[in-house]
Image: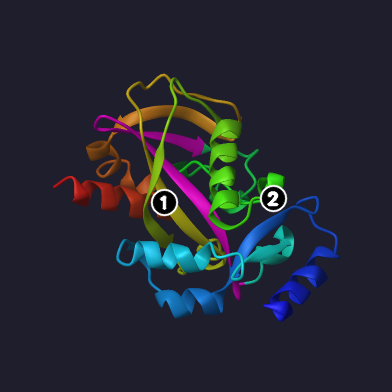
């Protein structure tokens, strides 16, 4: 653990195109210990989350370094919003932080866990859930109070983006589709039937969204 923090400190000392943003990461070795996988994982979810969100197993690293370091995984809340049989979607605009995903359709809202989420002495799961709430409130205007539940882990090592991220998938159930975006990065925001996203739109989805849509479509059968 001490060695991991020393590495993080060296990264944090450098200049960053992300303006020195610090993001929560776990060592790739921990992911392998938990049980590496591709796609969606629901088995053993509680135990895996317990390891990932244990303050002794994660730390903050400079984001620019983390984006190029596949020996660590950035933990990313990935929130999917469902209203009846329709799923919220948007097109990633150029103002978004991840240029490798621009112009892709996404069904996931979320982002990185940052040091600000540890305010008030929060650590572990409390800090993580504070990040989930912050990211949703920064990106969307919702019509009602919302509760989110974790339904899966998400991993895709087939591309450079996925190799350095590990998704934690949340499902948010809404009674109203009166949702608007607060950021230009969420362009063409709207709801579409799950069957449409799993059909003619599927190839336009970013890979994480493809995994989520396939999972939701399968769980509805």
Q: Secondary structure at mark 2?
A: helix
What residue is rendered at 47% in x and 24% in y? Answer: 142
Q: Is residue 143 one of those drawn in magenta?
A: no
Residue 9: x and y in percent read: 80, 69
The segment highlighted magenta reads 70-91
Q: Is residue 148 visible?
A: yes
On residue 169, the disc is 1
* Left or right of residue 177, residue 26 in this image: right
On residue 121, the disc is 2
The mark nearer the N terminus, 1 or 2, is: 2
Quadrant of the image occupied by residue 197: top left
Q: Residues under labels 1 and 2: Cα distance?
A: 25 Å
Quadrant of the image occupied by residue 35: bottom left
Q: Is residue 88 one of those drawn in magenta?
A: yes
Q: Nearer the viewer, mark 1 or mark 2?
A: 2
Q: Is residue 116 above or below residue 47?
A: above
On residue 187, the disc is none
């Amino acid at each position: 653990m001490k060695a991991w923090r020393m590495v993080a400190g060296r990264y944090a000392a450098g200049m960053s195109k992300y303006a020195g943003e610090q993001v929560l990461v776990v060592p790739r070795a921990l992911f392998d210990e938990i049980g590496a996988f591709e796609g969606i994982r629901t088995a053993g979810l509680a135990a895996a989350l317990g390891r990932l969100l244990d303050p002794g197993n994660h730390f903050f690293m400079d984001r620019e370094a983390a984006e190029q370091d596949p020996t660590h995984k950035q933990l990313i809340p990935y929130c999917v919003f469902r209203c009846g049989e329709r799923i919220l979607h948007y097109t990633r605009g150029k103002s978004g932080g991840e240029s490798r995903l621009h112009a892709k359709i996404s069904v996931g809202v979320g982002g990185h866990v940052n040091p600000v989420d540890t305010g008030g002495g929060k650590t572990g799961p409390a800090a993580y859930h504070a990040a989930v709430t912050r990211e949703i409130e920064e990106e969307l205007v919702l019509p009602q109070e919302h509760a989110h539940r974790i339904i899966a882990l998400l991993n895709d090592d087939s591309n450079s983006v996925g190799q350095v991220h590990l998704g934690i998938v949340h499902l948010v159930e809404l009674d109203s589709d009166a949702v608007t975006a607060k950021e230009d990065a969420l362009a063409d925001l709207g709801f579409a039937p799950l069957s449409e996203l799993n059909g003619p739109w599927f190839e336009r989805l970013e890979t994480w969204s493809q995994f989520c849509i396939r999972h939701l479509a399968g769980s509805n059968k």
